[in-house]
Image (tube, rainbow, N blue to C red):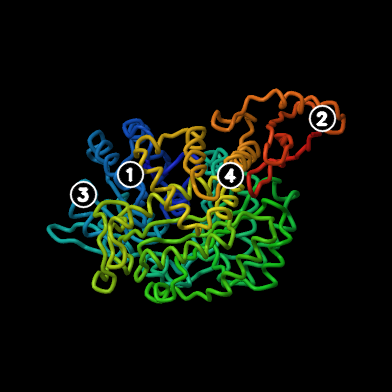
Amino acid sequence: MTEQSLTAVLCVLNSQYIHSSLAPWCLSAGIDTYCEKGITAKVIEGTINENIENIAQRIIAQNPQVIGFCCYIWNITATKQLLRLVKNKLPNSTIILGGPEVSYNAEEILREEALVQYVVSGEGEKPFALLLNAIYHSKGAHNIPGVSYRKGGEMVIASPYISAEDPPSPYTEEYFTALKGRIAYLETSRGCPYFCAFCLSGRCGKVRFFELERAKKELLLLANSGTQTVKLVDRTFNANRKRAMELYRFIIENYGTAISQGVCFHFEIAGDLLDEEMISLLGTAPVGAMQLEIGLQSFNAKTLAAINRKTDVERLKNNIKCIVAKANMHIHIDLIAGLPYEDLHSFAESFNIAYELKPHMLQLGFLKLLHGAPMRENPAKFPCHYVQHPPYEVIETPWLSSDELLSLHHTEDALQRLFNSGRFRRTLEYLLKQTGNTPFELFSQFGKFAAGQGAEKVSKISLDDYTALVFTYFSRQSGIDRTVLRDVMVCDRLTTNSSGRLPSILRIKDPALKRAINELKRNEALRPKKGVKRGWALLYSEQCLVYVDYQNKNPITGEYPSNKLYLNS
């Protein structure tokens, strides 16, 4: 007699290839832990940019009886298309959805998606495994926590499941085979100490920290997996100060030995929870070994109170300044446009304060009304209009008109290309000083100008053409010296682009360049090392040759060091 078996496929569509996904591997670990012997699972990862039919064929080739899909705002539309293709070829298969995009609207999903049999809400490792056991034995799903389904003409809707146990480790041999150097994700706790009105994390239960030795072991496994980036997905990594200190110290002490050189650990933290001892410890980390993401949301006190975000703003600002001054790690801070009581003037103030903190990245995000978020569930308290399809972005609030939000999108585009790209740092410093504009004024004005060139043109614009756009626009501004502007843009280009080639807008044909290069070459001490590429250009505002050797790139700024040779008159 042949032993009964059940094969499941766990599928997720990532936003980009470089991103791996932890969720299906967590479910797979749950199957290994809680499922009966005859049940096996195969993880299939794709991206939303791939041909959906190709991904469907990969699933169909496994001939699974059960297919589980991990659902997020960025993949839900493509996932629905994918499950229809699969179900068409495997009509007897059971379709199960899970993930944050379906956990708080299970009834709506079951009502609208006839091909979906079950929705798993909340933490899925145990509920999904118990559901597979029930399917394996042809039993119903009643009394399985977190599982919603249809029963006759009725809907049985379960609350999102929150486990009291540490989940089984997802880091199997199959996981590491599939990782292939992509960004790896590590979870050392679940839950969040905050209850922000726009976020789901506060609904995931109180913070539960996994066993410390497990965290260290998994950290080492990922650090030596071939990845360049390990992202800690803990909602607020430093919520437990003592534990955070222990893990930071563990990384610092083992970096370059037990931890591969060149790996970067990314942490999401609350900046106002840092103290002098922790800042001092972080300052001892090897350059580029860590990066911190700090969610500010806003500097408007009324806004922060409305979204239930308790923040010591002055302490937060001082802490960020201290960390940035250490110059050993990349600092990423976030603002959100569209929050309650945040009008254009208030948002501009928050933007300027954030910019002056000198982070390496300032992300301007836009409020999204997620299923399950208090802001979506309480429209009377949080009135706003938002797009009804994913990602549910806000398009108008009582404080920001639709036109103002559109203008902020143009500002965000300019911020992304000019500042966050790291390609125009000297240029921006010069422009802000000479024009007298605030950072918000500069980015919003240029963003509006760039948008006026046409959305399609700007979205596909090359770096050379964008550089020409920047030079053309700002060279006409009051207080700007075209020669100085050209020179700072030359320095930015040479230090951030290892081609060593200048765009035509910055190029000047001058025989003096060849003479300066020859003078440089005559000095044996200044010659480039063998095999090292060099870029150079004349700076007319300083009467010198700037040159850059393309080695020893700064892991924080992404720049190559530059040198200057001042020329004889």
Farthest residue to the right: give it.
524
Label of residue 498 in the image: none
Query: Is label 4 in contact with label 1 (beta carbons under 8 Å)?
Result: no
**The C terminus appears in which quarter of the rendering?**
top right
Label of residue 67 in the image: 1
Query: What x and y, as percent, mark residue 437?
Result: 50, 57
Secondary element at image label 1? strand
Answer with left or right where residue 498 lies relative to residue 459: right
- Residue at 87% x, 29% y is 524
Secondary element at image label 2? loop
Q: Earlier in the sequence, mark 1 or mark 2?
A: 1
Q: Residues within 10 Å of mark 4 (few under 14, many from 20)?
A: some
Which mark is nearer the camera, 4 or 3? 4
Which mark is nearer the camera, 4 or 1? 4
Q: Earlier in the sequence, mark 4 or mark 3?
A: 3
Q: Amino acid at mark 1?
A: Ile
Q: Amino acid at mark 4?
A: Asp
Disc 3 target residue: 113
Q: Whole-Å distance between the Cαs marked 4 and 1?
A: 63 Å
Disc 4 target residue: 481
Disc 2 target residue: 527
